[in-house]
Image: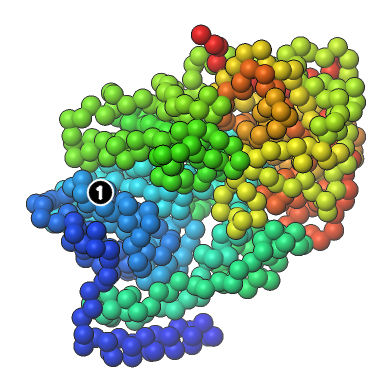
Amino acid sequence: MAKSSLSLEVSSLLSLCAVCVASATVAQPYPKELEAVAEADTMIMVPMRDGVRLATDVYLPKDQDGPFPVVLSKTPYNFNEIRGSTLDQALKFVEAGYAFVVQNERGRYYSEGEWEILGNPQTDGWDSISWLAEQEWSNGNVGTLGCSSTAEWQMALAAQDHPNHKAMVPMASGAGIGRVGEFNEQGNWYEGGVHQTLFTTWLYGVQQNIRPTFPADLSQEERQRLRSLYDLAPQMPDVDWSKKLAELPATSWLDTVGANAGPGLEMLMRKPNDPAWFEGGLYHDSEDFGVPAFWFNSWFDVSQGPNLALFNHARNNASDPEVRTGQFVVVAPTLHCGFFRTPEDEDLIVGELNVGDATFPYWDQILGFFDYYLKDADNDFVDSTPKVQYYTMGENQWQQADQWPPSEAEEVTFYLDSSGGANSLFGDGSLSRNPPLSDNTDGFTYDPMNPVPALGGNVCCNGGASLGGSYDQRAIEARADVLVYTSEELSEDTEVTGTIRTKLFISSDALDTDFTIKLVDVHPDGTAYNVDDTIQRARYRDGYDEEVFMTPDETYELDMSPLSTSYTFKAGHRIRLEVSSSKFPQYMRNLNTGGNNVDETEAVIARNSVHHGPQFSSRMVLPIVPSD
């Protein structure tokens, strides 16, 4: 009743506003550079099959004859003023002869209905494509494009095989992937069975299930007028997430910062195998993939492993041969959605690491891809474009291959070894191609109230609580609860490109705990830059369908989630592997109780161990590309 009263009051107030302003027509403002090349038709309310209407802006090429191919950007974000990347996209596509369309997901800003994460892609996505294909200014060929939230909904839509959805360009789309291959991240909520905290911080500013709405009978001119006066963007107070995420229980985080009502708590309570993950807008590899796709991923972004796995899944398993042929991927050395922010006149710095000149002809290739599929252009894109283009850090150059991982990489095993004292960078841990001759154990104490801090890595969207990219790890490695295994100096440049697999033999005195690994490049001066890392919850060591707890002090085999990278360790450098049990606040702490973690307030200190030697061969397998 309270919600209905609120909606009625807001509706009445806005109806009055509409009457007051309807006497004058105010054009929806948009930048002069876009006005010079585009005809805009804004605040169109596009109907979905259930009658809900989605706010939509259309930009058509000025002084050009249609019909036009269409590129759709569907977003949960505010485009009240077209600017930034959305403006860049509008200009690029309109100037290239495309209709460019921006649409808000249902329940967002001026779109009607109740919001769900990923925006109902199977139904609203389908209906939006159908509407666009039917417009007189459309040639019936629709492509989709976006980064992050504007990309993730495209995954589930691709499984629907809409006849007018001809091509897609998903960038940083991991949050749209549920389960693919050996990855079970459920849209970035998990990694290795461990909660990632990024969605809690993201939902704080996004979920708005109680929000002001406008009367349904407003004219388009009235909606345009109101949009010029009312932004509808929530003004959420700043939160120090590095402190908030340290509080327990985790289920209180959104409530205690005053977040609006939304799905955050319910999704936080789901386990990796919850059937609810298969009822929403996530894509799972049990589905077909029906659309040619040009994927853009980043080495320092969340879910690059699942993203590459889905590229391979689509390329190898799509039922349509032309869809299989039409899969392309680019992997850049950037942070989340950093593709178009790569500097053109200076080196790219990712965190603290200089990765050189990483410029790439993004727009040339994106337009070539869409021209081929949406304009039927005879541009030879499919035959002339490499299937895989990736940036090799360390060597700092772009490379290409026919597949991922590249076929020429050879698996080389590096074994963990020590005399039982691998704790910290001052310990005796070593990483060697030679198997150890004797069995030893390295132990450390994991205290959830004093977790290993996150510094760098594949980080996104967590309100600044932890930083993405590559940083000097020596302060982390000085801790006694971090095991450090380091190789001898390399005699030659060593390129590692592909999937990295790590097997640990572990034990603990707790029923459940986590283990982390981190691949590190140690420079001659001792600086230690992180390359990639992951985490694995012990209770999911046999898979994610059921929890299997440990018997204290028994030894278990733990296969870590695979790493993916392309990195050249230069001659004179050393390869290092860190092992610990936390990386906080990027990942939620395991409280070691064997309980749910998310709703608990008490923690248990765990004594964790890594075993290595002839009996327990803890090891890391690197895909090394032979030197010429």
- From the viewer's perspective, is 458 left or right of 252? left
| Visual colour scheme | rainbow
Nearest the camera: 186 or 191?
A: 191
Kindly identify the residue that appears in the image at 57 percent across and 23 percent down.
568
Nearest the camera: 75 or 79?
A: 79
What element does badge 1 sit on? helix
Nearest the camera: 268 or 414?
A: 414
- Category of crowding for the residue at label 1, using alpha-carbon neighbours closer than 10 angstroms: few (below 14), some (14–19), many (at least 20): many
Kindly identify the residue that appears in the image at 71 percent across and 63 percent down.
244
Kindly identify the residue that appears in the image at 22 percent across and 51 percent down.
94
Q: In which quarter of the image is residue 524?
A: top right
Q: Quadrant of residue 226?
A: bottom left
Q: Is residue 239 positioned above or below 153 on the image?
A: below
Q: Quadrant of residue 128?
A: bottom left
Q: Position of residue 17 (x, y in %)?
A: 33, 88
Q: Position of residue 38 (x, y in %)?
A: 19, 58
- From the viewer's perspective, is 46 left or right of 477? left
Q: Is residue 434 positioned above or below 92 on the image?
A: above
Q: What residue type is labelled 1?
A: Phe
